[in-house]
Image (tube, helix red, strand yellow):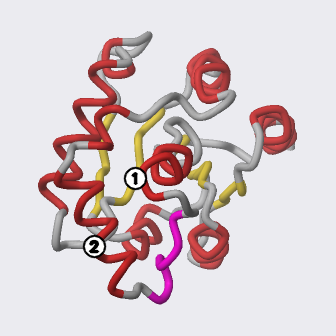
Amino acid sequence: MKVKKIYLDMDGVLSDFHKRYAELFGENAAGEDRPNKKSSENWKEFVKSGQFETLDWFPGGQELLTYVFSLGLPIEILSSTGGPKYHSEVRKQKISWLLDKDILLLEQEKIALNIVPGRRVKRFYSFSGNVLIDDTEDVVEEFNQYGGTAILHRNVNTTITTLESLLNK
């Protein structure tokens, strides 16, 4: 397979959204598929208090980023803001996180930012040769269905091994 471009998700790949959410609310970030009133209020508080700017690195996130930069391929961020309601606020916070971590200043002159208003939008980046590294199963499945290749990210070593096998095909 000729890999033309690598897309990196942020939350659950580079940044640790779930850790911060659990610290603040004492529970996992539930409600992605079926939001309830409590999860909606928690989400609103998470966004309004600027939490996306302050997330820790996801374990192995720096190692993964270093590895993909070493490949010399175009790399782009493809991350969701969770929907249109808070899109502009979350987008600003995610850009701030990327700037704070110097990701936008690394080895390439420019990393394209695709910060989209919902995870279902990611499928529109799915073309042959495009690889997405994402931690959300339905996003991975959909990206694969639409012609791209997605890697379900759980840990850096497995993701790097999977990406290496794609590059060697």
Q: Which residue is mark 1?
A: 79
Give the Cα separation between the discs numbered 1 and 2.
Answer: 22 Å
Mark 2, residues whose alpha carbon is within 10 Å: few (<14), some, or many (≥20)? few
Residue 21 location (% of width, % of height):
46, 53
Q: Is residue 122 visible?
A: yes
Identify the element where label 2 is drawn.
helix
> Mark 2: which amino acid?
Glu
**Most foreground residue, 148 or 153:** 153
What segment carries the magenta color?
A: 29-34
Q: Which mark identifies residue 133?
A: none
Q: Main secondary structure of the magenta part?
A: loop
Tell me what residue is drawn at x 80 percent, y 44 percent: 166
Kind of residue sitting beneath label 1: Ser
Position of residue 65 measured from the top left corner of the image (x, y, whole percent): 57, 24
Which of the 4 quarters of the picture holds residue 146? Answer: bottom right
Using the rendered view, name the quadrant where residue 6 is placed. Answer: top right
Where is mark 2, residue-wise?
41
Q: Position of residue 12 (x, y in %)?
A: 57, 48
Q: Residue at x 58, y 42 (%)?
A: 13
Taking the image as shown, residue 98 lies to the left or right of residue 63, namely left
Is residue 105 depicted above or below 161 in this figure?
above
